[in-house]
Image (cartoon, rainbow, N blue to C red):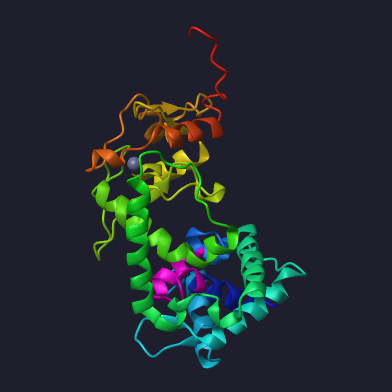
Amino acid sequence: MVINDQRRLVILLSLHDLSGVGTKAEVLDNIQNRHYWNLARRERAMKTNRREPVWRNDFAYIRKKLVSEGSIGNSTRNRWTLTNNGINHLLRLCREASEPKASKLTENANRRIRAILANSQSQPPSHLGGDVVDGGARGLRKSIQANLKEIMAVSRKRKPQLVDDVDDVELVRTAAPRDEAFRIHIQKLYKGACALCGLSLRSPDGQPESQAAHIYPKSRHGSDDLRNGLCLCRLHHWAFDVGWISVRDDLTVIVHRGLPADGKYEQIRRLRGRRLAEPQDPEMRPHPIFLRAHRRMHRFERKRRIARAGT
Ligand SMILES: [Zn+2]
């Protein structure tokens, strides 16, 4: 697959994640956050005379092509929208990419492609993005609203479930509005501040730097129950996800004993023994079921032995 077709595919894939509509920044950030593209060093470099990395500039150029090919609409300024033609284009590229493997596509991208192909066999292409693609931004907002309610209802149940009861295809179809709803709730519960270090930076347009993390990860179908969520700065989100740190049931932080002793890791090491900030609604504090699963996953704790009688 020629490289520009791989770029086309990743742009359309990202738009599909966003339920068919997004700004340039949203589409490109999504490609970056989901690691869809194997970035060469050359692509990471800043483009001279533009204030953005080379790869973003390359992708913006391909987006213009997609507009002229009718796969992306440009009726609204700074809104990239996936057209029906674009959905068919995406499907075609997904089939082409599945073999032989396209070199710039990461495993994350390939996983997504397989899910989309599986989904397209069970539904006609025009339903790929649900009603959201056709409804544009309004549909997306409605979908986020529905997810906000649903997530809150699930989180109010007495006993949380470790994993969400949705299959892969459904997960792909509803991922974008659901992720967004989860993020909105978590940001609000923690006022946008990292629960570990308290950092609460914002971008020039007021967007929080912090992220909504799943304690038991989404990659393992971890639940969108808000008691499985934490607001974390990027550094601590990473450290938590890779298992340098975990959290006890009493919300104190434990640090992996293999953490390198040098100063580079100081921002992680100094969290040892610290207590997590609690969310505004105490009912939504991290639930032991998720914390335990995280500790086990990263081998801070073994599976509990069967309790002996009398203990
Ligand atoms: Zn932090």
Q: Is residue 159 magenta?
A: no
For this rendering, which residue is in front, 122 or 51? 122
Q: How many marks?
A: 0
Question: Residue 219 placed where, x, y %?
Answer: 55, 50
Q: Quarter of the image for the N terminus: give it.
A: bottom right
For this rendering, which residue is in front, 240 or 201? 240
Question: Residue 110 placed where, x, y %?
Answer: 65, 63
- Predominant SS of the magenta segment: helix
- Inspect this view and state whether residue 51 appears: no
The residue depicted at 70 percent of the width and 66 percent of the height is: 103
Residue 146 falls in which quadrant of the image? bottom left
Write down the region rendered in magenta: 16-31
Check the image and report above or below for 278 versus 153.
above
Residue that protrudes farthest toward the right in the picture? 100
Residue 267 falls in which quadrant of the image? top left
Question: Residue 130 placed where, x, y %?
Answer: 49, 75
Check the image and report above or below for 231 versus 268.
below
Q: Is residue 17 magenta?
A: yes
For this rendering, which residue is in front, 197 or 302? 302
Q: Is residue 85 left or right of residue 201?
A: right
Q: Is residue 71 left or right of residue 77?
A: right
Question: Residue 238 placed where, x, y %?
Answer: 46, 44
Check the image and report above or below for 191 versus 61.
above
For this rendering, which residue is in front, 284 or 101? 284
Where ligand 1 lies, by quadrant? top left
- Inspect this view and state whether residue 284 appears: yes
Check the image and report above or below for 65 versus 52.
below
